[in-house]
Amino acid sequence: MERTIAKIDVRQADQTDPLRAFRDRFELPEGVIYLDGNSLGALPKTVKQRVARTISQEWGEQLIRSWNAADWVHLPQRVGNKIARLIGAQEATVVAADSTSINLFKVLSAALQLNPGRSKIISEGDNFPTDLYIAEGVAKQIGKDHQLVLADTAADICAMLDEDVAVLMLTHVNYRTGYRHDMKALTKAAHDRGILVIWDLCHTAGAMQVDLAGANADFAIGCGYKYLNGGPGAPAFLYVNPRHQGGFRQPLSGWFGHRAPFDFDPSYAPSGSIEQYLCGTPPVLGMVAMDEAMSVWDDVDMTAVRAKSVALCDCFIQNVGAYADQFNLTLVTPRDADRRGSQVSYSCDNGYAIMQALIARGVIGDFRAPDIIRFGMTPLYLSFAEVEGAAAILKDVLATRAWDAAEYQVRGAVT
C-alpha cells in the first residue's frame, strides 16, 4: 500500500525548524534555490577564512614547519574521526584520503584477500558506475575466475548470496532513484553466508543517521563533497571494521601507510591501524577545507537532520504530485521514507532541457541519464518555503514549455 503524505504547513515548518540557524553558516547566492547539495554541498562560510589562513600563514610564513606546527600530518586521521561520528563508527576506524574510487580499490582488494576461495563480487546494475568500473578492474587484476555479478533489482540480491560470493558491494542510497537499502538486514544476510560487505555512503553521510558499528559492516567508503560540504573534489573517506585492521595489506602501499614513514625504511612495513589505508602525502589545502567544513557538524543533531530530510522530500513530492501526471513526470524515488535517502527524482521526457530551464530560473538541481531530473534535499541550509517555491517554478517551466528553447538543448560536459 502506497504511503500517504500528510499536508505540510510550509510557514509553520520553517518557523519551528530546529536546524534553521545553521543556514547562516553557509554561503548561499541570492535568488538561488539550491537543490543540488547531493552533488556538491554549499560553501561553509568559515572555510574561506580557514583556507586563506592556511595559505597566508601556515604555508606562506611557517612553510614546511607547518607539518608539525599546524599538525598537517594528522589531518587524515582528524578529519576521519569527525566523519566517524556521523556514520556510527568508532574512533580510529575512519580516515580521510584520496577519492571514493581509489578507496574502493583499497577496501575491495582487501576484502577479497580476507575471503579467499570465493570468486564473486555482487553488486547492482544500477549502482554508481565508478563502483562497478573499479570492481571490474579489481576482478580482472586478480584473475583466477573472479568476476563482478550484477543484480537486476534490489529484491534479487539476497537470492544471489551463495557460497561462491566473496563480497557484497552496495551503495546505501542509489544515486539516481534515491532508493535506500536496509544496511543492517543485508549485512547480516551476507555475513550469515560468510560474505564480507562494503557500503558506499556517498549519498548517505551527512544526510541521515548511519550506524556502521551497529550494522557490523566490514568496510565503507564515501565522498566529502556532497552532504558533508567539503568542496569540489574534496577528500573522500573510508571505514574499516576494527576486526579487519592489521591482518592484511591494502595494495597501495605508499609511505603514509607505513608504520613509521619518517624512518625511511626501504622495505614496506604496514601500520597495523586504520592508517594502513593511507597512501601518499595528503593534499593539505583540500584536507584543511574538509576539516573546517566538518566543524559545522559539531553541534548538529543527526536525528533532527533526518526528520527534516524526510519532511523536505515529502513537501516536494506533495507539491509536484499535484501536477505530475499532467506533465508526464514519474516519481522514481520511494514515497516510503524508510526506503529513500535525501533526494527526490522523476523520470520524464526532455529531462536535460527541463533542468537547464530550471537552473536559468534559479532552481539548481541536476540531470542523470537517461531521463532523471534529481533534486537533493540538504537539511542544514534548505527551507520548506524554498522547496515549495521550486515546485511552483518547475510547474511553470513545464506549463509554458520554457525548456523547449534552443539554448537548453545544448549539453555541457557535466550534466
Image: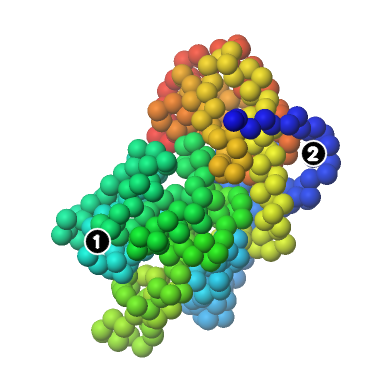
Secondary structure type for disc 1: loop
Query: Could you say which quadrant of the image residue 265 lies in?
Result: bottom left
Pinpoint residue 304: horizontal percent, then vertical percent: 72, 52
Q: Residue at x 54, y 21 (%)?
A: 329
Picture disc at residue 118: 1
Residue placed furthest toward the left? 144
Picture disc at residue 227: none
Q: Which residue is mark 2?
A: 13
Query: Could you say which quadrant of the image residue 260 lies in?
Result: bottom left
Secondary structure type for disc 2: helix
Pinpoint residue 276: horizontal percent, then vertical percent: 39, 75
Quick check: can you spot residue 134? no
16 with respect to 326 (left or right): right
Q: Quarter holding the C terminus? A: top left
Amino acid identity at mark 2: Ala
Amino acid identity at mark 1: Arg
Pinpoint residue 394: horizontal percent, then vertical percent: 62, 22
Most foreground residue, 362 or 134: 134
Mark 1, Cα crowd under 10 Å, few <14 / some 14-19 / many 20+, is: many
